[in-house]
Image (cartoon, rainbow, N blue to C red):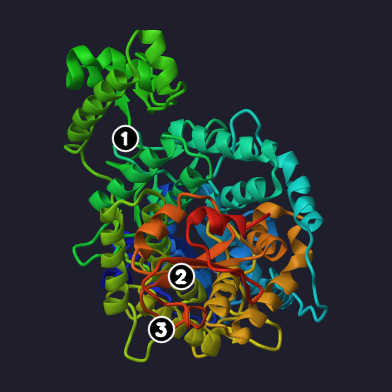
Amino acid sequence: MNRLANSASPYLLQHANNPVDWFPWGAEALQKAKDENKLILVSIGYSACHWCHVMEHESFEDERVAAVMNEYFVCIKVDREERPDIDQIYMSAVQLMTGRGGWPLNCICLPDQRPIYGGTYFRKNDWVSLLFNLADFYKTKPEDAEEYAVKLTEGIRQYESIQFNSEQATYKKEDVAIIVKNWLRYFDKREGGMGSSPKFPMPNNWQFLMRYAYLMREESIAEQVKLTLHKMAFGGIYDHIGGGFARYSVDGRWHVPHFEKMLYDNAQLLSLYAEASIWQYDSLYPKIADEIITFTKRELTSPEGGFYSALDADSEGAEGKFYVFTKEEIEQILGADAELFCIYYNVTEDGNWEEEHTNVFFRNESDEQLAEKLGLTVAELISKINTAREKVLKARGKRIRPGLDYKILASWNGLMLKGLCEAYRAFDKPEYLDLALQNASFIVKNLINKEGRLARIYSGDAVAFLDDYANVIDAFIALYEVTFDEQWLYKAKELTDKAMRYYYDGENGIFFYTANDDEQLIARKSEIMDNVIPASNSVMAHNLKKLGLLFDDDSYSKISTQLLCNVAPQIAQYGSSYSNWAMLMLNEVFGLYEVAITGNSFEQVRQDFEKNYVPNKIILGGKKGSLPLLHGRLAEATRIYVCRDKTCGLPAENIEGALKQITN
């Protein structure tokens, strides 16, 4: 076993038996490279990554390939989820060199960590040839290697950077409209989503577009959002048996998933379907939300109340083997009920994807359409299908399961905690709030130290990054909004102050991704662009805006304003990469309402008020509280106060009266 045997990371442990002399990232490996004047080979991936497994099997488990790697390089394995700061730097390098990125990510660096070459997956023969060529290049042309490293490192430092914008910005509807206008050409109006293939859910994109459609009264955008929500939920990217979404589909129809299931995707999709239920109710939305939560409780929840990171794409050495079935297998499980199940989920004798006779379950008709075709009532159809699903789930449970990445990450737990709060907000199910409170208590107890700083990983010594702070703060604010328990808001404020102290660059008006007392890498970068997870800077901008209003603290609000001002010139170019920033701009255009609900019946009124879609609001209240907006407004009689821009309307005695004060 190599040096990875002592790691806590499931991904690193997967490579502990490789003949490659892997090091974890750390002083020992970095010093060895300098002492022996060897190139560093940084290989980055994560435990649920299918192509990481393929490259390991083809190359890293091969004695001859390992011999080349060990002879000429100091080889370092990195779990991108443990060390996203390292991944961020070398991903930038590979994107600058090749125009694309992904995992596994492999970068060749000088002994001082500066990269000179990189890429993603390499076939074995190509990999060995590349290693020989790079080793020879460094030996025979060290000056050229140094020159290239200088240029590439400067590019990394400039990549995804922004300038301080001293001009006071004002935003109009036209500014937001141009973002969407430039975005329209990427819409897939037949299958939903964007582009052709592969297709990623991108929940934050559709949350912005949902809010845009509502506030701007753009019905065509609303239709694209609804189309996407339905196509994703009907597609094979969704696990129709066990609940939850895979990371993406490899085709353009959401049919064949890349089978890994990530906590962060399901957390954000939970928020999306919950919000959509309030926006334009469809019985599909609460069903999907509930099944995501059921999946998360069953397969991704630790005994302590934390949420695990992911399920692997592979089981028994094959991608998707746990999830796919032959028609014969379905008939053995369901007997006479198999025919209806096969019609419902498009199961065929020949199979519906690349593996012979195997099927990825998907839907192409609504329950209403299919029930009418089959001469059943909708209730009968749903009852029969649900009974069959339970039987298939039970049978599937006897199979060898995909590997579990049991890391518990602060950032991703924050995303799921917020998703649970949004689900409770939408559906009023106490069990959703119970799970949220259990997770919030876990975070406080296990991921916040005595100094009030976050740890990234449970039972580890890894420091937190800005996304950990941003997403946990966001979740605590959301938890306050559904409980009116101020302890969560004050915890959010305390973490915000820590983030300000350790991550904020006041000179440039942006947050660094790493703390000022963290390990210094070759570049200290900021996360600006929204991706499959919104950028930590955009989440912090939202957090600061909300906290500035809730605590009447202009210092928070000014930083939020400056963050948006700095990024605003970039947003219109490619809205998909700035959707969370665009959502912040929407709030600037339409205002962010503060809705305070007080009095003995505050909880019932809060629940009833939430049945109305008001995306540009924060909500507060209760029978007691210390927030500035509640001063002088706490009484037994129920009242609703609607405020905007430090101005409040007359107290309303009912929800209808309050809604009249909110206009778009």
Q: Looking at the image, which residue is at 33% across and 77% down? A: 447
- Distance from Cα at disc 2 to Cα at disc 3: 51 Å
Q: Amino acid at mark 1?
A: Tyr
Q: Looking at the image, which residue is at 18% across and 34% down? A: 394
Numbered label attached to residue 55: none
Q: Which quarter of the rendering shows the C terminus?
A: bottom right
Q: Nearer the viewer, mark 2 or mark 3?
A: 2
Residue 86 vertical position relative to residue 663 in the rendered view, above or below: below
Q: Position of residue 383 (x, y in %)?
A: 25, 24
**Which element type, helix, strand or loop, lies under badge 3?**
helix
Q: Which residue is mark 3?
A: 28
Q: Position of residue 169 (x, y in %)?
A: 80, 72
Position of residue 294 in the picture relative to residue 569 (left or right): left
Q: Which residue is mark 1?
A: 323
Numbered label attached to residue 620: 2
Viewer-proximal residue among 165 and 610: 610
